[in-house]
Amino acid sequence: MTNDEIKAAIMADTLSKRDGVYTARRGFFYRHGGSSEKFAARVQALPGAAVLDHGEVWKAFSGGASLARSSHWWVTFTVQGGA
């Protein structure tokens, strides 16, 4: 799978890769029943994916802030035979 295919499959807002480990982030303003566990489950459903860690970052709203500096769920994972 390409990085764009992975990003689309897990509905991530950003996807980065460093030393073979992916970090996916998905921003939120309201949780609407979402959680880092549910985001990690989407990642785990990818063929060959192994979730390493996941969590939530909560920040007060700041217009124009990057996703990494806003509220988001994150998942770190590897993909066997990854992009």
Image: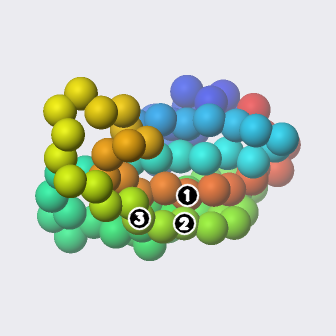
Point 61% across, 47% down: residue? 23
User: Mark 1 highlights which residue?
Assistant: 75
Is residue 54 depicted above or below 24 in this figure? below
x, y (%) of residue 15?
55, 36
Q: Mark 3 Cα within 10 Å, few/some/many (few <14, many 20+)?
A: some
The residue lying toward the viewer, choosing from 13 and 70, is: 70
Quadrant in the rendering for residue 69: top left
The answer to whether residue 26 is left or right of residue 81 is left
Looking at the rendered structure, which numbered label has been put on residue 54? 2
Q: What residue do we see at 62% from left, 67% from top? A: 53
Mark 1 to mark 3: distance in Å?
Answer: 9 Å
What kind of residue is marked 3?
Glu
* Depth check, front residue: 75 or 6: 75
Residue 58 percent coordinates (x, y) = 31, 61
Judge the density around disc 2: few (<14), some (14-19), many (≥20) Cα neighbours within 10 Å: some
What residue type is disc 2 on? His
Is residue 40 positioned above or below 2 on the image? below
On residue 11, the disc is none
- Residue 76 x, y percent position in the rendering: 63, 56
User: Is 9 placed left or right of 81 in the picture?
Assistant: left
Q: Which percent across, then down, holds residue 56?
A: 41, 64
Q: Is residue 76 visible?
A: yes
Instruction: Give the quadrant of residue 77.
Output: bottom right
Residue type for callout 1: Val
SS for callout 3: strand
Asked whether the beta carbons under mark 1 and mark 2 sit within 8 Å of each other, the answer is yes
- Find residue 13 and report its image quarter: top left
Label 1 – label 2 distance at C-alpha: 4 Å
Which one is earlier in the sequence, the residue at label 1 or at label 2?
2
Camera-side mark, 1 or 3: 3
